[in-house]
Image (cartoon, grey):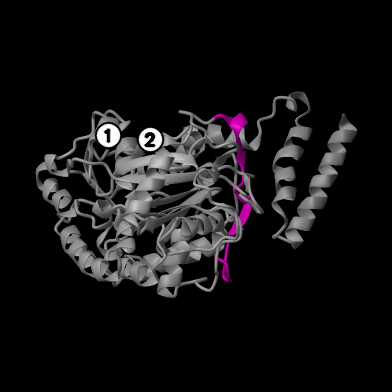
Amino acid sequence: MWRKAALVALLALTVGYIYHTNPELPDIILRFIAQAIPQSLSVQHESNAPTLEETISRAWETLITAPTKQWGRIAVGVNACIDVVVSGVGLLQALAVDPGSGQDHDVLHSKDDLKEAFIHYMERGAAAERFFSDKEVFQRIARAAAEYPGAQLYVGGNAALIGQKLASYPEMVVLLCGPVGPKLHELLDEQIIVPPESLQETDEYHLILEYKAGEQWGSSRAPQANRFIFSHDVSNGEMSALETFVASLEEFQPGLVVLSGLHMMEGMGRELWEVRLKEAVIAISDVRNEVPIHLELASMTDRDYMSSIMKEVMPIVNSVGLNEQELLFLSQAGGGPHSDLPAWNSIPDVGRVTDILLWVLEHHGRADPGSEADLTRIHFHTLAYHILATVDGHWGNQRAAVAAGARVASSQACGLQAVDVGKVVLKAPLNFYSSFSDPRESLVLDPSNPVTVWRRGNVSFHLSPVLVCKRPLRTVGLGDAISAEGLLYSELVSQQSSEQ
């Protein structure tokens, strides 16, 4: 056995030397060092040595501790609907649509537009959401979807999904404002308070076309599981519940406000969103100053609209939640770092992501010492890892918050209440940089302490890997669950945080 140990030690020294001279070593070699070598050296316990996934999952349980101060009452608005979840390929085949080439469409006008946009995003394994302009055609597709074998109806809309997640914690009192029809009201957690003004006679339906990793349709193949969402939703599109939402806050007295649904206005056309966005800014500004506001973003395609949200809405909220597509689109809309990048190539580069997050906080948040903006926190999530970027002195317990968001992504995607290490896989990079360009810091992911922390100026970054579900059962609402969980473990502080 000593020969085996000596060989492994020699190999470790050799690989270590190569890594020292070439820090951009492929992850596969780093994984071998982190996993194979320690297991081989532990002669007595090599059969019982934990995997990287087991090590990370156990470490999360230690890291994830509740904040000293809970939110208590949380108000959530304003988009809500019924999600009809169905196989995307199966539904399109049932609609007698033939496979073909993909093409993105900002707005869908026909079944052919739907097919092309679905294929475009399926081939990239990326999530997207679009407005379907023709009401009658949409209703026919919606009926076909609801009747499709295996179709399922769920609570939908970012606000309602976040509300459902928050309400799963008995100590939380949750208010939900949005267009709530009879079926949605029936599906909502009984602990959720819905103001009478939010109730309406009919439900709004969103169609969720899911696809699995490796699923094939014609010549198109999905690299990973995801979904394509579309709707003809005027109530949510006009954010008709916004004023009701803000008016209800005075009586409800929340500790935290969560706002979503701005992306729905994009499909209504520029004339409407220009006016309605200004009204939204006035309404949001009416929320009393001591109550923090979290804004949850979603897929958008209109750069002018995204630019307006960035300039007018972001500075008056405290926190933002978004994924990799939305982050890159923010930069493209505002001429920020890496805005010439057409799309992410597989797992987004941590250095590039960090550059954009810092740019948002410096240009539209309070990272600029002279700024009066309220934005001090961004929760970024992608398939393989999450990052919380916070301006120092405003938020606490962020190690726990980012780890909690990652943990719920790992369990919920597999349809479980807890992480099953046999059903997940680590895809996050084991080494990465704090920036894409110099000066930059070389960082390493430690599985036994899986929240990596670094600073750039007065902004702290907390990164946690995600244990990716090998066979996800449902991807819809995952981002909303991640943001909700991260917020539950976050704490707003009034003095300089001592968190390192």
- Count of marks placed on residues: 2
Q: Is label 2 in a helix, a strand or a loop? A: strand
Farthest residue in the front direction? 96
Residue 400, image x and y in percent?
42, 41
Tell me the crowding category of disc 2: few under 14, some 14 to 19, or many 20 or more residues within 10 angstroms, Cα based. Answer: some
Q: Is label 1 in a helix, a strand or a loop? A: helix
Residue 189 visible here: yes
Residue 367, image x and y in percent?
36, 66
Is 355 situated left or right of 183 in this image? right
Residue type of the residue flagged with mark 2: Leu
Is 149 situated left or right of 437 in this image? left
Magenta stretch encompasses residue 374:
no
Q: Quadrant of residue 120?
A: bottom right
Residue at image location 22% in from the left, 45% down from the top: 179
Nearer to me, 259 or 70: 259
Nearer to me, 215 or 481: 215
Is 410 situated left or right of 76 in this image? right
Residue at image location 50% in from the left, 63% down from the top: 104
Residue 184, image x and y in percent?
27, 36
Magenta stretch encompasses residue 440:
yes
Residue 226, image x and y in percent?
52, 46
Q: Quadrant of residue 164?
A: top left
Residue type of the residue flagged with mark 1: Lys
* Range of magenta residues: 420-443
Residue at image location 53% in from the left, 48% down from the top: 96
Please name the residue that numbered disc 2 is placed on: 153
Please name the residue that numbered disc 1 is placed on: 183
Is 400 situated left or right of 77 in this image? right
Nearer to me, 255 or 160: 160
Mark 1 in CB contact with mark 2 (< 8 angstroms): yes
Farthest residue in the right direction? 3
